[in-house]
Image: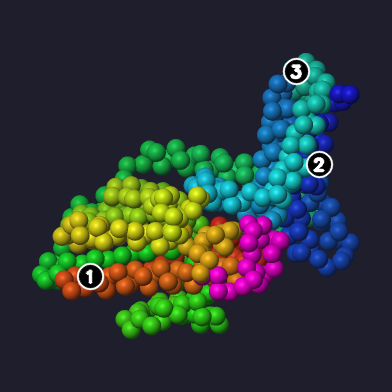
Amino acid sequence: MTKTLRSEYLVLLFSLLLMIGYNQSLWQGLIETHSGWSLHNALFLASCAVFLTALFNIIFSLLAVKNLLKPVLITIVICSALTSFFMDSYGVMIDASMLQNVVETDSSEAFELLSFSFALHMLIWGLLPAWIIYKIDIQHVSFFRQASINVFSIIMSILAIGLIAAFFYQDYASTFRNHREFRSLINPTNYIHAIDKTIRSQFKQAEIDIVPISQHVSLGAIASNKKHRTITIFVTGETARAQDFHLNGYARQTSPLLETEDNLINFKHVSSCGTATATSLPCMFSMFSRDNYDNDKGHGYESLLDVLAAGATDVLWRDNNSGCKGVCDRVKQENVAHLNIPELCNNKECFDEVLLNQLDKVVSATNHDLFIILHQKGSHGPAYYERVPKAFEQFTPICKTSELQNCSQQEITNAYDNTILYTDYVLDRIIGFLKAQTEQTNTAMIYVSDHGESLGENNMYLHGAPYFMAPDE
């Protein structure tokens, strides 16, 4: 039997549902920061429930229009279910940088996040509420009558928020000033704001003219007078946290081959420019430091690769990941992520050794200086176990699922450390390749990861948290 309901009641019930069912990460954070039992803390948390409900009621009352309300609520409930799953399961924050990271993730990485738990969550919190909303028969009134009802509902919600502010302003100011991450946990306003910011940023970037910085580049005296050409391989790592390299004091031996190199220089105190590839990769090759970098600058100026190319160096970007995020748009590119090489690839992806495939032909194809960027798949999660061949599963038992919350901390760490061990092997092979070229060539290899990773510390997983609150890992 179809249930008849007035639109303002549907909006209010929907707001309650969002507040209770789709904001578990926010509630967990609020409760942890006000854990001491007192009447004041209890009243503050109760006021948060009223505040969120009133906030959502304002937003959706603005959309309580015939033929619009149902599609909007169905879309929001499905998107909110999707968002809540990843926030609750992996401890991620939803902001514009995270959304950009999602948009630029390739299909194989995206499929790793799909699981039975995800399907069950979407069924219970996404499809079922959407079906109920679809079946509700909304009792419509005239346009002007509905508008007056909506205005009244909005005014009442504003008054409720004002009343809360009168009694708890200091609590809200303190909480949200000291825990700015809470703003990225309010579902659905977090992703609505992120979508708006991302769209505006994309339109802005489309209008940006690239600022040239390579127009006066010329070779210096040393480079002009050298006897042999130079081959530099710049390895861009993925999600490798410095603290898991034995080189940097980690208890486990995860870098045995690199440590045999006599000419190795290891910079132990380096931090990434961003917490996700979409930011950190363009920043890495830009002329800006982290403190004065933003995406407009990263995509609005020529990069290091443009400068090298203008300086009579052949530049090649080889990718075994999800692309160069605009860095290599004006230089030669090769994507090797899906080559059909049985010993190096499966039906989903290739191991990082594929970056060396036929690299000798690239070197012999030119007599110019060469700057080759090898963009690794590296340690990208959550399916760490899929990043390494079986021979490199040295630390066991390992987490063999993308549902990290279902694995022990040790299993996750084991699977992750195996990816560092495999990176050590790949880098050693690259060094060996360059050593074979040294008779008539100057060679160098540079390795730096784009960002680190959380493996469950403080109940956080993966990467992409806002920089101001991202952990050192």
Residue lying furthest top in this view? Answer: 142
Q: Secondary structure at mark 3?
A: helix
Q: Identify the residue at image location x=80%, y=32%.
A: 132
Residue type highlighted by circle 1: Gln
Q: Is residue 343 left or right of residue 107?
A: left
Q: Give the mark, 2 or 3, whose residue is nearer the N terminus.
A: 2
Is residue 272 magenta-colored?
Answer: no
Residue lying furthest front in this view? Answer: 342
Q: Secondary structure at mark 2?
A: helix
> In the image, residue 421 lies at what x, y percent?
49, 72
Check whether the beta carbons of the residues at disc 3 and disc 1 lie within 8 A of each other. no
- Which disc, if any, is residue 144? 3
Q: Which residue is mark 2?
A: 16
Q: Is residue 45 at least partly visible in the picture?
A: yes
Q: Identify the residue at image location x=18%, y=74%.
A: 439
Q: Identify the residue at image location x=56%, y=48%.
A: 110
Quadrant of the snapshot with the N terminus: top right
Q: Nearer the viewer, mark 2 or mark 3?
A: 2
Q: Main secondary structure of the magenta part?
A: loop
Residue type highlighted by circle 2: Leu
- Toward which corner of the image does residue 281 lie, by quadrant? bottom left
Check whether the beta carbons of the residues at disc 2 and disc 3 lie within 8 A of each other. no
Q: CA distance from mark 1 to mark 2?
A: 67 Å
Q: Which residue is mark 1?
A: 437
Q: Is residue 367 left or right of residue 471?
A: left
